[in-house]
Amino acid sequence: MDVLDLPVDRHKGWYLSLMAPNIKGPTFAWLDPSRLYFNSTALADCVKDLTNPFLKDTIDLVAGIDAMGFILGASVATVLGKGFLAVRKAGHLCVATETQNYTDYTGKEKTMEIRLDALKPGTRVLLVDQWVETGGTMKAAIQLVEKLGATVVGVAAVAIENTEGGKWIKDNYRFSHCIPDELQSQIDRKRLDSFSSFGN
């Protein structure tokens, strides 16, 4: 599918076929979801699918995780009419912060941070990231929000894989994602049938 094409039937997740496979090896994520952002309708439909489950919830702030979560998080915040909080990789903020160590999907030890003046007890936060693979990054963001006394309303991502960490998130928090039930097994085996259109 050409990146700017639109199908006649825009069912949930139609835009997933726009995502590109990894061609650079194991140090990179297994696919590139950001290709769907080239298509304005695909991006709008993706954001709609992420926000629909939370439309009746009280949300004070949307937080997006560095870096690709900034794109979706800011888009979600705009649709919901809420402010946006950037959850940053450590060392990027020039103000007082709270930090949390974590292990990312590559197995690397990292630290993330949020500014101390953004959250207070009772603030209701929707956390957004592009993808949840092992769940380590999202779990650290949850811990950061809760350390400051705020409440995680839910977690939204294009996909949440059924790894141990992904299942922990699904079991403990409300969540939304863009994956139709029939595609979840492809996500979990890290190979979409649509990749065949890329010639790989």
Image (spheres, rainbow, N blue to C red):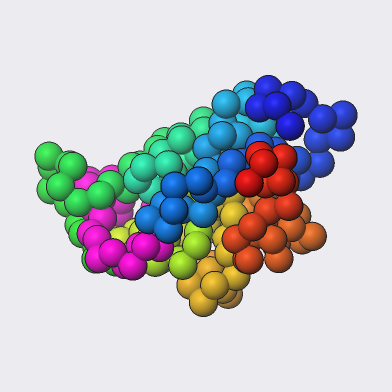
Q: Is residue 29 left or right of residue 98?
A: right
User: Is 39 in front, or is 196?
Assistant: 196
Can you give x and y, in whole percent of width and height, for residue 123 in the image?
39, 53
**Magenta stretch bounds:** 103-129
Identify the image quadrant of residue 184.
bottom right
Can you give x and y, in whole percent of width and height, for residue 35 in the image?
56, 34
What residue appears at the point 45 percent right and 66 percent down from the top-left corner? 135
User: Is 46 in front, or is 144?
Assistant: 46
Can you give x and y, in whole percent of width and height, for residue 192 in the image?
68, 53
Q: Residue furthest right?
A: 8
Can you give x and y, in whole percent of width and height, for residue 143 in the image?
34, 66
Does the magenta segment cover residue 92?
no
Q: Is residue 89 left or right of residue 36?
A: left
Identify the image quadrant of residue 171.
bottom right
Image quadrant holding the N terminus, namely top right
Identify the image quadrant of residue 167.
bottom right
In the rendered view, tell whether residue 185 sits above or below residue 44. Answer: below
In the rendered view, tell whether residue 37 sits above or below residue 94. Answer: above
